[in-house]
Amino acid sequence: MTAPTAEKTARDLMHSGVQCVKSTETVATAAVKMRDLDVGCMPICGPDDKLIGMLTDRDIVTECVAQGKDMTMMQAGDLAHGRPAWVKSTATKDQVLALMSEHQVRRLPVIEDGKLVGMISECDLVRGLEKDDVAKFCNAVYGV
């Protein structure tokens, strides 16, 4: 008889080493960071290093470039709209999936002791969860 396995937590699913773009950094600087890190989304952190928003490559295109705004003058914090969804590192996989589904997000920052410690992306879900859980997530977010 095998012992039951502990349920996965956000910490188990996340990838660490996530970097923030400071709210006072320019959108141009953020875009360079995103390119260098090969990511399509970065958390925006305020002066106290607390999460204040998320910046996506789509945000840069639709809210800056397409509107003719100067990427070297506009700050990343100008694109931080509303309160971003996030999860505690101790949250269960079901809580993670529920939150991502509820907010229709494909990336979720992970917070521990008030600080950003990681990010959960779709790829992390595919690598860390059973097929049924991934299918539930895809159905909730993409309607497939």
Image: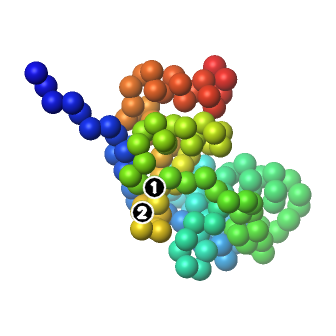
Dot placed on the residue nearer the N-terminal end, 1 or 2 = 1
Determine the image quadrant of residue 34: bottom right
Per the image, label 2 sits on a secondary structure element best described as strand
The residue positioned 78% from the left and 75% from the top of the image is 73
The residue positioned 89% from the left and 57% from the top of the image is 67
Measured along the vertical axis of the image, is residue 136 above or below residue 85?
above
The reply to whether dot 1 and dot 2 touch (C-beta < 8 Å) is yes
Determine the image quadrant of residue 33: bottom right
Q: Position of residue 136 (x, y in %)?
A: 53, 25
The residue positioned 49% from the left and 42% from the top of the image is 96
Residue 136 appearing in the image: yes
User: Horizontally, is 53 left or right of 123 in the view?
Assistant: right
Give the residue furthest to the left: 1
Q: Position of residue 133 (x, y in %)?
A: 46, 26
As drawn, the label of residue 112 is: 2
Name the kind of residue labelled 2 in the image: Glu
Name the kind of residue labelled 1 in the image: Lys
Q: Position of residue 118 (x, y in %)?
A: 44, 56
Give the residue number, with chain letter if any, for mark 1.
88
